[in-house]
Amino acid sequence: MSRIARPLALYAVMASLIVAVGFIQSWTVALSITNLALISAIMTLGVNIQWGYGGLFNAGIVGFAALGGVAAVLVAMPPVTDSWIAGGTNLGLAGLAILGTIGAAVFVRGRTHGRRRTWATLFTILAGYIVMRIFLDPASDAIEAINPSIQGYLGGLGLPVLVAWPVGGLFAAGAAYLVGKVALGLRADYLAIATLGIAEIILAILKNENWLTRGVKNVTGIPRPIPSERTFQTIGWVSELGHSFGLSPAMTAAIANRLGYALLFLLVLGTILWLAERALNSPWGRMMRAIRDNQDAAEAMGKDVTRRHLQVFVLGSAVVGIAGAMLVTLDGQFTPTAYTPLRYTFVIWVMVILGGSGNNWGAVLGGFVVWYTWVMAEPIGNHLAAALADLLPAGWLRSHILDSAPHLRPFLMGMILLLCLRFAPRGLIPERRAPSTRKPEVN
Amino acid sequence: MNMLVAENLTAGYGGVDILHSCSFAVGAGEIAVIVGPNGAGKSTAMKAILGMLPLRTGRVTLEGADITGLSPQARVAAGMGFVPQNDNVFPTLTVEENLEMGAFIRRDCYQDTMESVYALFPVLREKRRQPAGELSGGQRQQVAVGRALMTQPKVLILDEPTAGVSPIVMDELFDRIIDIARSGLSILMVEQNARQALAIADRGYVLVQGRNRFTASGETLLADPEVRRSFLGG
Amino acid sequence: MPIRKFAVPSSEAEIPDFLNAIVLLANFVVIPATAYGAQLALGALGVTLVYSVLRFANFAHGDLMAFGTAATILIVWLFQGWGVSLAPLPTAILALPLGMIITCLLALGTDRFVYRFYRHQRSPAIVFVMVSVGVMFIYNALTRFLIGVDDRRFEDGERFIVTVIGFREATGLDQGLALRTSQVLTVIVMVLVTTAVFWFLRSTRTGKSMRAYSDNEDLALLSGINPDRVVLVTWMLAASLATIAGVLYGLDKSFRPFTYFQILLPIFAAAIVGGIGQPFGAVAGGFIIAFSEVALTYAWRGFLTHILPPDLIPAGLVQILSVEYKFAVSFLILVIVLLVRPTGIIRGRVF
């Protein structure tokens, strides 16, 4: 019974915490927290697929989230025709150069052996890279020269932004496949280091390849799937409905807009959660857990562990990519500098561990709890610092303490992670174990 | 007088007893050998004697002193030397460093002991600057035995020292073990190669299903028709 | 990196032109890469020591470096306030030992209250990695609390041993060469420290017991090696190395906490390239990563201008990767090593 009661109670507490924000602060804030918590929960689900099902440590979540985000730009923004005219040809040639390099590398590898094979492959790739650059550099210069203050990039495909969500998943899955191919099958911490690296590179590309993403100049005005607040204000029945609750039209529109996103996100979260639960309880899910719990035994039984790991790694990253695209959709802009590993990799990890690794409902709850804490850490930190500073005379120490309030966040995250790993390693909602593997309760 | 005595040992894993009131003893300068079929509880007996398993009943004494409550490390300090079956050297350390690590708990000068180990295993002196991991299987066993001798133990306990080495190396190793015993050390070993081991044993213990089945001198056991039939293949 | 203007090469001046090319290379590639390599080597040595004894990739190492540097900078400020200095050397050298002690205490405290529990539980390596992420957050918060998130320069004393102008005047070459105090200091300290660490591991009783423990934990315990002592010494070495690496890096470039998180990638790459768990490999790996990074992000046109006939000089910058992608180099080398020789150049532990 408590298997149902405990999660229910925890979810109820979480919901009331958010409702409390609605009453005390404002409903728009409560809904904003909910929306970001929903996206966090989806990312957490993705990571939980990797960690909870497969025991894989992905230290590059931020990179996969950013790849999802760039999908929103490339899918939804209108194409910049002038840029395509200016740089399209060279860009196409650069693309051909990449394909040619891959072909040449495969060809060379087929004809060489051993150490020579390594060097020949490296040399081929280097040569191909140089050829690619010969076309890419002028293309990039030409594109970036087109109306640089608002464009200077290729734009996107002009498709509905919702299309970007699955595309974001595909982008992240593709990157995950490449990393997984290299780093899986080795020590578990090599994957962590490799993913840390790929994330740095993805972020560097997104920040510096202006022709693709406008780089640090950001892409703003990404089309929205939900009518803007201003549009909502013009819809009569919405304003009236708000009025009957005693809300101003502006407030009503703000709430309606956020509620729209919340429902959309909830739909995605529900779908992914349903699929994840089904997968977990399928023979495939049982096999994954068997591999995680005893890799040697699974290998001895003839399971291709590395292949299975690659599967969960790609799947989990795809979910993170979807969430990344949703995040950019919610913001309506793509800001490469906003992607910091602390916020998008390690905080997600805190969510997974706190929620309960291996349990999808736990992961979702973890997303909510930790995001809520993250948001609340700032006002609480300010209050704490102010209270502490009040006790002190004006001076260096006092101003230092006031300045230090924002640093409460990482401290709190670290504390949650460490305390949880130590005292509740199975998280708020522990993984349900199959009866056969459960240890006898009494000796 | 008996150097090491283990009486009525009952022990096992997770509530299931593997050993049932087994007793072993080895006198000063003697070689005692525990043999038996696979799964008879030989390694469990070894772990129980070394303090790596909690005992349900029984006690272990060394030179008359009760050491039942001591940890494996404390037993080493009290005078038990142990050569595990696998992973019994430090592979990236040189032979000499392996021996030094054997003498880690000693605060006095251990050069003499090292000299006597080199005298016993001359090939180790030759290879003393080489990493132990690069040696052959037999030489590695010599390093392992040498490492255990560095504490100047009163009893040397060996877990299947000849597992996985060639017959020639095995004979050589048994000869060295006899040499060690002649120098006054007591030796207790668990062996798979029952016939060869019993041939050098002053005492032999045949263990079956966790119980002492036969206990006698090695010679007697080798001559016993029932032992021969059941355990030595005729 | 903007390329300086240089004189048009003329046919009579072939020999000095060759010298110019070498000076250019030394100034922009060899000297910076050597200093950077030394910093990475010290960082990787710490990572690899923790790895070989405690058996996990310590994600908190970058932030431990940041903390050590922050602590040292605070002491530098204190000394500067008192008017204490080591001129012409930077005050940081004087403050470094104190910074190391503080960082050691932090690392030992962390071990006592965090890692020890998991060691006694014999938790799997990945749990340790996860725990080190939690520790990373805490160190990060501590560093920010101590010193904030801004860029800090704390290099004082005589900045240059050789200045560009001084070099040009002395040699009459077109190309200048600068040699900064911090660069020379970095290399000297690195040589002294790694020699000391290697000597310690090779020749002292404690050092040997650390290697023994790393080789075969069970046998080490049976031999009476005290695991708590081995772990204690390992953390002290790792914390000291982290502080030294962090301070030298900060002197050479500047101190910004986030940079120290980013440097984790090249440090891990150096440790893996060298064969993780292999101290000598880690040092070699540090230099391999540093030289590759600098060479691949350097614009070679200036160098080629000096050595090629005028009509063969390429039009472009001849820069393989722009500087923004320097972390990609570590990653590429890491990938190549994982693909070709996962054990690293000196065989480390893979499983």
Image (cartoon, rainbow, N blue to C red):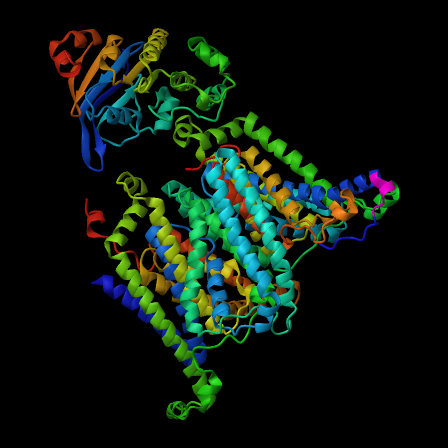
Q: In which quarter of the image is residue C161?
A: top right
Quarter that holds the C terminus of chain A? top left
Q: Which of A176 and C63 is in front in this view?
A: A176
Q: In this view, does A44 lie above or below C65?
A: below
Residue at screen point 58% across, 59% down: C145
Q: Is residue A207 above or below residue A247?
A: above
Please give the range of residues in magenta.
Answer: C9-14
State the image coordinates of residue C340 (x, y, percent, origin top left): 49, 38
Say which residue appears at 19% left-offset and 24% top-offset: B40
Residue at point 60%, 72% (across, down): A82
Q: Position of residue A107 (x, y in %)?
A: 48, 43
Q: In the figure, C115 relative to A88: above or below?
A: above
Q: Which residue lies furthest to the left in this view?
A: B226
Residue A338 as seen in the image, left or right of residue C87: left
Magenta stretch encompasses residue C345: no
Query: Percent position (x, y) of residue C97?
Result: 65, 42
Quadrant position of the N terminus of chain A in the picture = bottom left
SS assignment for the magenta stretch, majority: helix
Is residue A311 visible to us here?
Answer: yes
Q: Can residue C46 be seen in this view?
A: no
**C13 in the magenta segment:** yes
* Residue found 44% across the figure and 80% down from its top: A28
Report how many numbered discs are placed on residues in the image: 0
Please tell me which residue lies in front, C28 or C203.
C28
Q: Nearer the viewer, residue C311 or C281?
A: C311
Residue A162's quadrant in the figure? bottom left
C325 up-or-down from A232: above or below: above
